[in-house]
Image: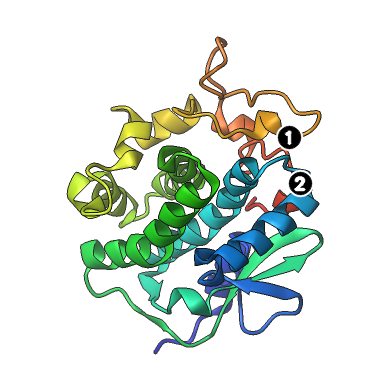
Amino acid sequence: MPNLEAEQLAALERFSVHIGQQPNIFLSAADILSEAGSGKLFEMVQRLSDAPTNTVATSVYMRRHGFFIAAQLHLMSEHNLLWAGDLEDVSLFIENDTILFSVPSTGFRVVQNREEDIRIILETYGHPVVDYLSKRAKIAKLILWENVWGYVLWMYSMLLQENSSFAQPDLDILLADETWKPAMRRSPFKQYLNNQRALDAMANYKRVTCCLYKELPNMEKCPYCPQNLTTPGQLNNVSPKLNDTSAKLNNASPK
């Protein structure tokens, strides 16, 4: 098992993932997959963001969960490492009114097979959470996966600009329909990209689905909302926060 270097630890923390036991833990990611655990999550998100319903709270939370998945994919592409722990080992904790994640220092390993390891990320930390919350809160899976995609797109776009060796191959795996089966028939990431290159999609960012943030108190539609008739917004201009309107929940966005 490799020991993480300071640069790798810092990179994870940029995506709201910390190593080791943290104060103010209130759930594990596995707890979310139960009625009681998801209820506790909804209550926390509603307290932090004033989300009016469980549906909106789920969309707000998946913007946070997207950080965790993006962190894993970034660790793969930039450092050729994977944290392969169980969902129950992922803890959710509160710091500065923000939901962050922590994982044990054990469980990190060198990437063995890029396609298989990306499937591990999706099948361990992605599909179970999206599938359960989609049913529990009555919200489309495409909305929840697009909340993840916004951060994944930003992350890969940054790595592509830095000429990262693994960024494009890893993104290609995520755009392949087979990577998502049997949980989904086709890659939602490919649908969101809409035949564009990642850098072009980032420069002219436009969502396919509405993230429901307009349902939060005193909030309007995001500039890249599909319900807008204006020109698509630039992801660089709205920052990696993706215009997260609940500042309390998203003030730890990567810079």
Determine whether 127 is above or below 117 in the image.
Answer: above
The answer to which image quadrant residue 227 occupies is: top right
Q: What amino acid is labelled 1 in the image?
A: Leu
Residue 252 shows in the view = no
The answer to which image quadrant residue 73 occupies is: bottom left
Is disc 1 placed on a helix, strand or loop? loop
The answer to which image quadrant residue 121 occupies is: bottom left
Residue 49: give its label: 2
Q: What amino acid is labelled 2 in the image?
A: Ser
**Pointer 2 and pointer 1: residues touching (CB < 8 Å)?**
yes
Q: CA distance from mark 2 to mark 1?
A: 8 Å
Name the residue tied to disc 1. Answer: 216
Between 83 and 56, the one lying in front of the other is 56
Name the quadrant of the N terminus: bottom left
- At x 38%, y 33%, the residue is 192
Precedes in sequence: disc 2 or disc 1: 2
Position in image of residue 235 (x %, y %): 56, 32
Circle 1: is it few (<14), some (14-19), or many (20+) Cα within 10 Å?
A: some
Position in image of residue 122 (x %, y %): 35, 60
Position in image of residue 127 (x %, y %): 38, 57
Tell me: 26 left or right of 19.
Answer: right
